[in-house]
Image: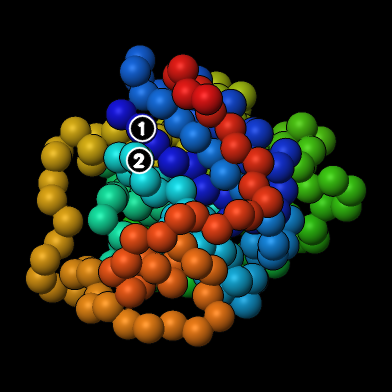
Amino acid sequence: MRLLLINPNTSHSMTDRMMRTALACAQPGTQIRAVTASEGVPYIATRAEAQIGGRTLLDLLAENRAGRDAAIVAAFGDPGLFAARQLFDIPVIGLAEAAMLSACMLGGRFGIVTFSPVLRHWFEDCVAMHGLTARCSGIRTPDATPGGDVAMVQEEREDQLVELCLKAVEADGADVIIPAGAPLTGLAEKIRERVPVPVVDQVVAAVKQAEAIVALKVRPASAGAFRRPDPKPTLGLAASLAAWLAHEEAMPSVTAIRPHSAGGEG
């Protein structure tokens, strides 16, 4: 099984963090390759940045999908997820959707805990996009965005994040907690004994859901809302994406990405 993990943000440290968690939970024989955006923002936090990240996701999928059994959108909020599912012929799994659906199998309502109040509106959009507003007890954030390197937020603010988890359980009635956002990848394992309800890691959920979907051996849609669009000419797009939209084969264009690989891949 060959998975592609796509970080539509430009932060290589976040890709490294997510890749470590992905490799630790993958089943034997699962190979994972990760790619990082070469343009955009270090981490997506707003609706506008999500639009940019969604376009980047499509570019990176067009360039790197060959030989992959499934792809993971490695940004909570799932930018570009539905567009990617309609366009490409492999399963595409979103961090947020995978975490939320996994949480729904563990309890009645889930609470989302993240590291910045700026993320609230975009995450609310994401919950609604997946039709899960009624299953979400709320989104808990600090009063202000932490200063310094956001990549270190879970190490520097673990106690504060645990406190937010406890408030989500006690005040909001959350049955399950999801620490949300790439910088919080791996936090669930660290704090699970400090929180009295299940804590779901977004990357672990996405990897395991991807493995399960591949195992179902489903075929791409040939009808309905997620049928691949008819061919269409384009102007100014990356060569790989333009070729895919036109239903043509093309050599991948050169993009400044940093690959990660595991399970014997080069």
Q: Say which element carries label 2.
A: loop
Amino acid beneath label 1: Arg
Q: Position of residue 62 (x, y in %)?
A: 43, 58
Farthest-out residue, left: 223
Could you tell me residue 2's position as x and y percent? 36, 32
Residue 102 visible in this rendered orientation of the protein = no
Q: Mark 2 to mark 1: distance in Å?
A: 5 Å
Left or right of 191? Residue 175 is left
Q: Secondary structure at mark 1?
A: strand
Vertical placement of residue 190 versus 96, above or below: above
Q: x, y percentage for residue 115?
A: 69, 51
Q: Residues within 10 Å of mark 2 (few under 14, many from 20)?
A: some
Identify the residue shown where x is 76% and y is 42%: 151
The residue drawn where x is 68% and y is 51% is: 256
Image coordinates for residue 176, horizontal then vertical, percent: 42, 41
- Residue 2 tag number: 1
Question: What kind of colouring is applied to the model shown?
Answer: rainbow
Question: Residue drawn 44% across and 83% down?
Answer: 234
Image quarter of residue 215: top left
Nearest the camera: 239 or 143? Answer: 239
**Mark 2 lies on residue:** 68
In this orientation, does residue 247 appear?
Answer: yes
Q: N-terminal of the two: label 2 or label 1?
A: 1
Residue at (45% x, 19% y) in the render: 263
- Please name the amino acid that badge 2 sits on: Arg
Residue neighbourhood size for the residue with mark 1, other residues' Cα within 10 Å, grouped as few (<14), some (14–19), many (≥20): some
The image quadrant of residue 82 is bottom left
